Image: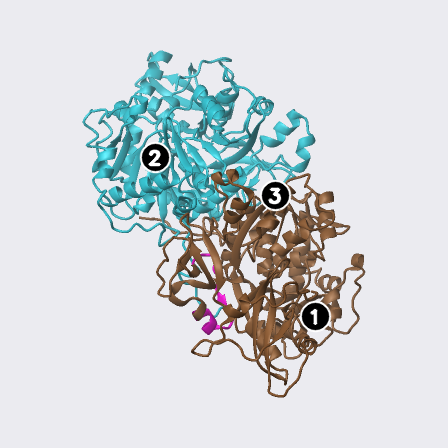
Chain colours: A brown, B cyan
Amino acid sequence: MQNVQHSSVNLSPVSPLDFLARAGEVYPDKTAIIYGKRSHSYAEFVAHAEALARAIRAEIQPGDRVAFLAPNIPELLVAHFAVPLAGGVLVAINTRLGTGEVTEILRHSGATLLFIDAELARQHGSDWKGGTAVATTIEIADPEFGLERSGLGLGELAFDAFVAQHAGDTKDLEWGVADELGLISLNYTSGTTGAPKGVMYTHRGAYLNAVGEMHHNAFDADTVYLWTLPLFHCNGWCGPWAVTAAGGTHVCLREVRADRIWEAIDTLGISHLSGAPTVCSTIVNAEMAHAVQTPLRITTAGAPPTPAVLAQLESLDIEVVHAYGLTETYGPITVCEHQPGWAQLSTAERARMVSRQGVAMVQANRARVVTEDMADVPADGETLGEIVFRGNTVMLGYFNDPEATAAAFAGGWFHTGDLGVMHPDGYIEIKDRAKDIIISGGENISSVEVESAMSGHPSVQDIAVVGYPHEHWGERPKAYVLLRPGAQASETELLEFARGSLARYKVPDYVVFVEQLPRTATGKVTKGALRALTDRPNPVSNPR
Amino acid sequence: MQNVQHSSVNLSPVSPLDFLARAGEVYPDKTAIIYGKRSHSYAEFVAHAEALARAIRAEIQPGDRVAFLAPNIPELLVAHFAVPLAGGVLVAINTRLGTGEVTEILRHSGATLLFIDAELARQHGSDWKGGTAVATTIEIADPEFGLERSGLGLGELAFDAFVAQHAGDTKDLEWGVADELGLISLNYTSGTTGAPKGVMYTHRGAYLNAVGEMHHNAFDADTVYLWTLPLFHCNGWCGPWAVTAAGGTHVCLREVRADRIWEAIDTLGISHLSGAPTVCSTIVNAEMAHAVQTPLRITTAGAPPTPAVLAQLESLDIEVVHAYGLTETYGPITVCEHQPGWAQLSTAERARMVSRQGVAMVQANRARVVTEDMADVPADGETLGEIVFRGNTVMLGYFNDPEATAAAFAGGWFHTGDLGVMHPDGYIEIKDRAKDIIISGGENISSVEVESAMSGHPSVQDIAVVGYPHEHWGERPKAYVLLRPGAQASETELLEFARGSLARYKVPDYVVFVEQLPRTATGKVTKGALRALTDRPNPVSNPR
């Protein structure tokens, strides 16, 4: 029936690169990036991406991984375009990880280039190097924030010098890709075993997720987006691409602090920001919190916002969008769409509706809640099942991990490991997690990883780590420890030991010594029973 | 590098069908369609689409063309989902065409099913049948608007009876497609030769264009969209899909009349509508025109809006989006994005900026203005070139017309036939048309077709038809006629003759008798010279 074939006239592989190429042409003089006293137009954004891409291209082969270890600074934002433009695959590493964890990700990804922020360079020294394939390290100084190069011998090159090396390169850069199914990035996430898994994002998936984010956040050319959400979380939930697609303004932020956030809201007219509910609670509980003068929309995901926080946000005239997703779904894949009738509900009833995980985003396929044999549970709001997804914004798979990929895709659907219900109105709601994951301030903590680290202490015979509800962080880990007969160890000593190998945020808030761990008949620790214990009503949180 | 393949877990062919499937699940109770006293929820929209799809599926083979000849009634809106859901290809025929033209399109498309509105059934009788492959005709009555079935013997089946025939069909319907590059519709357009060309739209192209429309129109769940733009124009510029993607409300309209439009604006809170500048001028020049109480955005394309109309719209607090495209680009492919600085311009200066065709929409690739050897013209706002496009929202080609397709895609780009300039700010502006096309009220009129029809009159020796600027319609055709030696014919007689074979809107407004037609050295009529003549300063427009 079709008497002509598709060709380059009418078939163009989609890529997030399209968005910056267009914004650079449509809005060359518009402010694209604000950071401290710096500000860059879209023409400069393009120029920086091209300059960085030329420099990276000279150092890598197509498909090579390029790692960044940096907070939300412009260089990492630019890298979201520069790395794929150079033919590379971006690996933005969680800045909260310990040195050993960083090394493991560098090793696993096989990254050959590492860009490291001067502050993190100071923190990690050169201890991360062993066994990685990193051939070149580039250190990013940030003089405005008092961060000169560390001079610790790890940054062979300063960022500016690295880029300048290839300023003379005049070979064309292609603002597009040959294959939309090719990789654009790896995003590492803690699996249940604690071994890092590199979630593979494609150009097509990232493009479509960005389109969905643009729609559900209502990004347009007037958007001023504050970067409170870490760029290393699902590539900032595809925000570098979505905000750029709309021609909005990115406001970068080194530190997610209440004073900095409110200063940006008040002086820059921030229209949008995103983050875990922790960010919401930081904002509403700040001393300087006040009703916003210009419309502000916060998209929150990672855990449901509490009714208290929702009410506080409402009282400050801040609009909230509650979304849900995982690293494996490019960040949010469902959104709790408001229904016309909800405006008439009481604040408490509305909070009840809004705290649900919701329905598929516009680019996504229907969310399902299924039984073990993949049948849909009844939409009764009560029958528990596993939440599973399919569609273009499900990851390609785990990098170099076919077993984990096959397990995640069992039965032809991506298994979230989250247990939930389907409400009669078609909204899903999470009730529990099947996986041993604790979500603290939007970060995944593998309880198995923490257990494994702490059981390395010679006095520990048995250990179980579970989450407990925490007002600010959503959840925090706590540990139940059985000591070896005759052995002695204090809580302080065990926590200090844990800090030796784990990122600080993964270290439990407290330790309870027990004489035995509750187990099922088959010998499995009944973690539900431990979670339910309120041993310490007001524990002081581990500083992070 | 990629150690897993894409599968149905992470690769889902995109289709506009996705949008109604989702809206039906997310907004089952929300009003999806309003038409006169009728109103349908999204659950009903889905049910109607499924019922119609079941009935169509029973009558066709996958890929068969299904024709509709109807104004903007709910049945045609539903067909935008029902036909592809049934595996068919939608052919929405221009209701303004003459019977002979309808027949030609039915023949060329090979449509086997024809749905015809009762009003159009009365108009065309059964004269359209000859030589077409139409096996079943279904007549759509509209009792609320006094339109019972015509009883003219052409509607073998009433719409409701046709659908009811297959109500018992319980075989699954697949809300998705196997191949996103497959056809979803044919949209017939007048080529320069006047022979109808069936522009092929794919699921992927329609999906991406709908995404672009959704973004540039800012469609969201609060959108109330008034159907002033004919659904047969580029599938209503993909609006059935875009408004549904956002979960907005469609307001159908049988007649695009000022009183009906203002009634809808005032009583239904219309937030968006689209149309040729003619629609804008109808709105602002209406007796009941007044400043709008709720935000209204009009997207206009087909011709640049005049400064006078822009100023009038501004004074009524109506926001205007000026877009540009062709049937071959799924409707709009560029949009005149407003720049931050434009708010400070005078109304006249702003009108000057806004009347340009603009820049590529977010889903499109960069618009180019090129010389004959496909080099970009300088961006000086002066050098004339042809506007060409590439990308996912360029048609697959002309149905069963490989020669015309090859000509349109010469050099690997789609040639619009529009001559324009590239401004220093990257905005394109049309200056003239290379093709012999007159655009009147958003409709293409092929001057060659009109010439060919009128030269069939025995007294006509030579004829040239060109457009002249018209306040309401943008352009209207006028004819320059050289009579045979000794032959006689009045203007009235020639126009009456033209009405015999042409749609009314294609019939020239007036005829000027000349003693010779101006020609180039090579014998080509210099139409530019004729266009420039202002023979009748205030001609009365042909009633349409």
Point out the frontmost of discs 2 and 3.
Answer: 3
In this rendering, the label closer to the viewer, 1 or 3 = 3
Q: Are marks 1 and 3 on the same chain?
A: yes
Left or right relative to A258: residue A336 = left
Chain under callout 1: A
**Mark drawn on residue A137:** 1
Boundaries of the magenta span: A390-406
The secondary element bearing badge 3 is classed as helix
Mark 2 and mark 1 residues within 8 Å of each other at the beta carbon: no
Q: CA distance from mark 2 to mark 3?
A: 42 Å
Q: Quadrant of residue A100?
A: bottom right
Label 2 vs label 1, nearer the camera: 2
Magenta-colored stretch includes residue A398 = yes
Residue B172, numbered circle: none
- Give the image location of residue B129, x and y in percent: 22, 31
Tell me the residue that label 3 is attached to: A314
> Given the image, what chain letter belongs to the residue carrying mark 2?
B
- Mark 1 and mark 3 lie on one chain; the one further toward the N terminus is 1
Q: Is residue B36 above or below residue A162?
A: above
Which residue type carries mark 3? Glu
Residue B518 seen in the current view: no
Using the numbered discs, state the Cα–Cα distance from disc 2 to disc 1 in whole angstroms: 61 Å
Residue B129 among magenta residues? no
Label 1: element kind: strand
| Residue closer to the observer: B491 or B44 | B44
Q: Chain of mark 3?
A: A
